Amino acid sequence: MLDPRVTVHTPAPLWLSTGIRAVDHAVEDLCSINSQPLADAASLHALRLLSRGLRRTKVDPGDLDARLDSMIGAWLSLVGTQGGVQKGASHAIGHVLGGTAGVPHGFTSCVMLAHVLRWNKAVNADRQKLVSEALGDANAEAADLVAQLVADLGLPRTLRDVKVPREQLRTIAEHTMHDPWTATNPRKIAGPEDVLEILEMAW
C-alpha cells in the first residue's frame, strides 16, 4: 500500500536519507555485473522519480504528489533485488558501517555511493552514463550528480559527517571483505586495501 498521507510525520532526515538508499539500489542495479533489462527499466524510472520527488519534498514536506513519486521510486528500486541483480561496494561497505560504526542505513548510502561510483568508473563508464541520463544530465559525471542530490537534500556527504573515526577505517575495510556484495562489485576488489582506498575517498 503506497499512501503518501501516512508519511507526513516521518522525520525529514529519515525520509530523505532512506530515499537516497533507494537511489543506491537503483544505481548499483544499473551498474551491476549482472544487470538485466527489466531491472534496468525499473531503476531508470526509479531514479527519475526519486530525484524530483525527494527534492520537492525537501522544499515542501506537505507535497503529497512528491511523496508518492518518492514512494513509487523506492518500490521500483527493489525490482533488481527481487530478480537477483547483484549489488556492489556501496551496499557492502554500508552494511559494515551500520554494524561496526553505528551509521544509519540511509546515511551509509549518502556518504558512500558517489565515491564508489568514482572508484568504479574505470570499468563501467557506459553504465554510469545511464545513471547520469536518469538524473537529468547525460554530460555530467554520475558521481557528481549523486553527490549534488545528497547536498541538495542537506544530508551528510562524508564519513566525517557521520562521526566515523578515521582510526576505524581499516577495521571497516577488513570487515567489508566478508560481505558477499564485495565480491560482485563491478571493479574487482582484491583486498582490504582497495576498500580502504574508497573509504579514504569518502573521508
Image: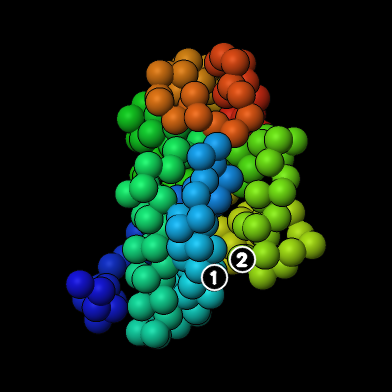
In this rendered view, identify the residue nearer to me: 19 or 59.
19
Up the image or down, 182 lies above or below 53; here it is above
Q: Residue furthest front?
A: 37
Q: Residues within 10 Å of mark 2 (few under 14, many from 20)?
A: many
Residue designated by label 1: 48
Q: Earlier in the sequence, mark 2 or mark 1?
A: 1
* Image side of residue 20 versus residue 6, left or right: right
Q: Which numbered circle lies on residue 159?
A: none
Which residue is at 39% across, 63% downward?
76
Q: Position of residue 77 (x, y in %)?
A: 41, 58
Q: Are marks 2 and 1 in contact (CB under 8 Å)?
A: yes
In this rendered view, identify the residue nearer to me: 153 or 132.
132
Q: Is residue 128 in view?
A: yes
Q: Position of residue 173 (x, y in %)?
A: 51, 20
Q: Which numbered circle lies on residue 134?
A: 2
Q: Is residue 113 in view?
A: no
Determine which quarter of the picture holds residue 201.
top right
Q: Give the quarter of the figure containing the C terminus.
A: top right
Q: CA distance from mark 2 to mark 1?
A: 5 Å
Which residue is at 68% across, 41% downward?
124
Up the image or down, 5 lies above or below 79; here it is below
Which residue is at 38% across, 34% downward?
95
* Image side of residue 143 versus residue 165, left or right: right
